[in-house]
């Protein structure tokens, strides 16, 4: 019944251990294979005229939908299991409601997919699949809520790519015990087992040693000196961030990190919704002429209601800041980068991440790596300084983000603003709301988020 599987997928599928954990390289089919096992279990139950129950807990609504539609639904049809269409409904828990997707199979077997949180984790008595568990927000709390539920004999499947030396997945994967059947599939093992990937092409494409080590070689990167841990970064990722079409016309704060030859030129646009800064757009340029960079910034000023913009004024930034101030007046502020100003901006940025009052694009490997690479070290005199090691761009995206956050710490200025004509924001097309009170709708992005 099952489709042809690569060697590592077959080993995972055939392992019937009650507790099973898999550390897989990115895009090696871990969700596809685990949903196949779930459907196979439902098929075996149907043959025996029994029922089974599975719950898939994903990092968000989009991932839950992918697991259901590109995994469960596909496999169930291949097995010839008759079912109605996937049914969406609002699952109501103690702390709110969550969008769930469910399919009912012969003899009453059910498979449900929904976002993971402590509420949903304790809400079912079922076999459980924790999909990309290292990226779940509040993974420790989810685990505490979940384990009493599955202790009554249910099975547990946990898969993920590493996400730094923190979180419950890291703890489970590195524990010295015999409870778990552990599977490790890095990109080299996957390709050796038949996965059609060009390893050198992948490595050249990601162009980041840390990201490659973690996403494809499955190394846990050290969190001890990272200014922003992967746990902090994951906690503020959102599927709707980084999409200019989501702009609601509110005040925006812009950070602009200047670079020409070796460094990136990055423009980061934040929109303030309630007390949350939503990333609306990240523009990156390398080796572009300064007038082209200025054109990109002018377009930002035209598209968005920019209350304030902070530029890196160091070195070549002096002339660029002066020119922008002539065009836009006091809304433009230059920041001279030194140990003191960097500490102020980095502290403001980290506070926002810790308070979860920012939203950044979800699943952007390059951006996550850039945010994580910033380290705080002490000089010979004991003074703090920030470094970004092993990379050519020196965390330019991170400093652009922090410059924008710094711009948002100053009072909003009153000025004449004529908005450009724009289609209604995707968030304005529905009456539903986000947790910060702003209109909200999940949906497919109409352009690439975060990196252009």
Image: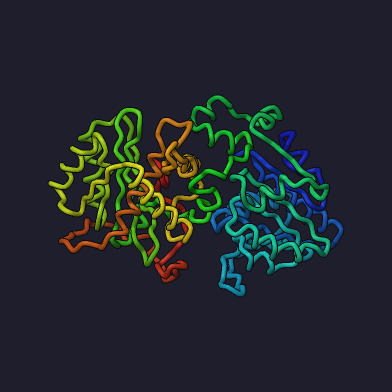
Confirm whether residue 4 shows in the render: no
Picture residue at 67% right of the left edge, 32% below the top: 190
Check the image and name the residue furthest to the left.
326
Q: Is residue 160 left or right of residue 447?
A: right
Please count the marks in the image: 0
- Asked whether residue 289 is in view, the answer is yes
x and y percentages locating residue 365 in the rendered image: 50, 41
Q: Residue furthest top?
A: 200
Residue in the foreground of this view, choosing between 41 and 153: 153
Residue located 33% across and 51% down the image:
404
Give how far across and how far down residue 285 sits, in percent.
32, 35
What residue occupies the far right of the structure in this picture?
48
Q: Most extreme residue toward the bottom, as rendered?
A: 94
- Look at 56% across and 57% down and name the residue there: 60
Quarter of the figure that contains the C terminus = top left
Q: Nearer the viewer, residue 249 or 432?
A: 249
Q: The N terminus lies in which quarter of the figure?
A: top right
Q: Nearer the viewer, residue 81 or 96?
A: 96
Q: Quadrant of residue 128?
A: bottom right
Horizontal side, residue 37 vs residue 349: left or right? right
Residue 336 is situated, as x and y percent measured from the top left of the image, at 27, 43
Q: Is residue 366 above or below residue 357?
A: above
**Residue 393 found in image quarter:** top left
Determine the image quadrant of residue 432: bottom left
User: Foreground residue, 311 or 415?
Assistant: 311
Say which residue appears at 32% left-offset and 61% top-offset.
Answer: 248
Image color mode? rainbow
In the displayed structure, would residue 195 be above or below residue 183? Answer: above
Residue 17 at what x, y percent from top left? Answer: 82, 49
């Amino acid at each position: 019944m099952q489709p042809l599987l690569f060697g590592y997928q077959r080993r995972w599928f055939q392992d019937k251990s009650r507790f099973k954990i898999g550390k897989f390289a990115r895009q090696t089919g871990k969700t596809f294979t685990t949903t196949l096992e779930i459907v196979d279990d439902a098929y075996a139950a149907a043959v025996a005229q029994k029922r089974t129950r599975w719950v898939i807990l994903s990092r968000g609504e989009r991932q839950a939908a992918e697991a259901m539609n590109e995994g469960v639904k596909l496999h169930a049809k291949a097995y010839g299991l008759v079912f109605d269409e996937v049914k969406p409904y609002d699952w109501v828990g103690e702390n709110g409601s969550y969008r769930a997707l469910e399919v009912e199979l012969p003899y009453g077997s059910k498979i449900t997919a929904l976002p993971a949180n402590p509420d949903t984790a304790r809400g079912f008595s079922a076999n459980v699949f924790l999909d990309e568990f290292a990226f779940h927000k509040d993974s420790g709390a989810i685990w505490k809520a979940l384990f009493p539920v599955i202790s009554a004999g249910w099975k547990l499947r946990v898969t993920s790519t590493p996400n730094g030396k923190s979180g419950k997945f890291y703890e489970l994967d590195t524990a010295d015990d015999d409870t778990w059947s552990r599977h490790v599939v890095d990109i080299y093992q996957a390709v050796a087992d038949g996965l059609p990937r060009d390893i050198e092409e992948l490595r050249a494409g990601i162009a980041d040693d840390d990201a490659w080590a973690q996403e494809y070689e499955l190394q846990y990167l050290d969190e001890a000196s990272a200014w922003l841990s992967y746990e902090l970064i994951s906690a503020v990722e959102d599927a709707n961030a980084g999409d200019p079409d989501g702009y609601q016309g509110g005040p925006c704060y812009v950070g602009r990190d200047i670079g020409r030859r070796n460094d990136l030129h990055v423009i980061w646009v934040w929109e303030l919704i309630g007390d949350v800064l939503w990333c609306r757009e990240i523009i990156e340029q390398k080796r572009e002429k300064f007038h082209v960079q200025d054109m990109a910034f002018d377009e930002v000023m035209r598209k968005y209601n920019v209350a304030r913009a902070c530029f890196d004024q160091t070195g070549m930034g002096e002339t660029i800041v002066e020119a922008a101030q002539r065009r836009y007046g006091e809304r433009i502020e230059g920041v001279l980068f030194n140990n003191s100003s960097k500490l102020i901006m980095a502290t403001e940025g980290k506070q926002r991440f810790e308070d979860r009052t920012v939203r950044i694009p979800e699943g952007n490997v390059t951006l996550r790596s850039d945010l994580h690479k910033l380290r705080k070290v002490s000089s010979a005199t004991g003074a703090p300084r920030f470094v970004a090691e092993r990379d050519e761009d020196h965390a330019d995206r991170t400093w652009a983000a922090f410059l924008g956050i710094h711009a948002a710490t100053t009072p909003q200025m009153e000025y004449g603003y004529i908005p450009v004509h724009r289609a209604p924001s995707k968030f304005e097309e529905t009456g539903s709301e986000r947790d910060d009170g702003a209109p909200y709708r999940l949906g497919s992005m109409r352009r690439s988020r975060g990196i252009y």
